[in-house]
Image (spheres, rainbow, N blue to C red):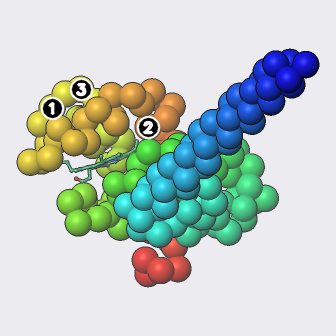
Amino acid sequence: MSDTSSSDTKSVRSNIQRRMQTLRWLLLVAVVGTGVHFAIQYVSGGTSVYSIESPVLPLIEELERSDPELGKKARAGMNRFNKNCRLCHHPTGHGGKFTPSLLGHTEDSIKVMLNHYRDGQKVGPMTNLMAPWAKELSDEEIHILGIYIELLQQAPSSK
Ligand code: HEC
């Protein structure tokens, strides 16, 4: 009788232990996840990774009404830019400590530069840092990125 109850207690205990272990894992994952989130946010200059705001979003919305075809491309360009490019060139395109500003480019000059990087040509001293990102781009992506980056110059803060 006492044997059964002690083995019952044991199984209840090991059950609780297992649950505690799962809880500890969940806690660890949550803590590490939050840490990584804030680390990325810090590196990318304080803009939240999950609520990216484009300085020209109002312009894009205006374009979507006045010229839906172009507006659609501009929005796609924005999404593509915010996926990778903004991490180094800043959401406004004005560049960072080690990266050039993209403001002042036209759609065509962006296309020329991105094609250089994509073709494996050496451009500046930090070509190696930029080229892998260009190599991933299709012609269509270069096209929409050019449209978006040219639009970035019209951001209120870059005037
Ligand atoms: C890891 C950081 C990084 C990322 C991500 C990145 N770039 Fe760059 N980019 C650079 C650096 C550094 C240079 C300067 C390279 C050199 O010395 O030639 C550069 C140069 C450029 C230039 C040439 C600018 C000029 O006037 O010389 C363009 C255009 C450009 N990047 C566009 C983009 C686009 C579009 C994306 C997203 C697909 C992107 N970059 C992603 C770091 C980055």
Amino acid tagged 1: Gln
Taking the view exactly as shown, the residue that stands out farthest to the left is: 125
* CA distance for labels 2 and 3: 13 Å
Label 3: few (<14), some or many (≥20) within 10 Å?
few
The residue tagged 1 is: 121
**Rendered position, 141 above or below 102:** above
Query: Which residue is at 50% across, 49% downward?
Result: 32
- Counting from the top left corner in percent of width and height, residue 12 is at 80, 30
Question: Which of the two residues, 21 or 140, is positioned nearer the viewer here?
Answer: 21
- Counting from the top left corner in percent of width and height, residue 65 is at 78, 59
Residue behind label 2 places its C-beta within 8 angstroms of ligand 1: yes
Question: Which of the two residues, 95 or 61, is positioned nearer the viewer here?
Answer: 95
Q: Using the rendered view, name the quadrant where residue 57 is placed.
A: bottom right
Query: Which residue is at 25% across, 35% downward?
Result: 131
Amino acid tagged 3: Asp
How many tags in the picture? 3
**Rendered position, 47 above or below 89:** below
Res 119 label: 3
Say if mark 2 contacts mark 3, CB within 8 Å.
no
- Counting from the top left corner in percent of width and height, residue 51 is at 63, 60
The residue tagged 2 is: 142
Taking the view exactly as shown, the residue that stands out farthest to the right is: 1
Amino acid tagged 2: Ile
- Counting from the top left corner in percent of width and height, residue 148 is at 51, 53
Query: Which residue is at 41% across, 65% downward?
Result: 42
Sequence-wise first label, 2 or 3: 3
Say if mark 3 contacts mark 1, CB within 8 Å.
yes
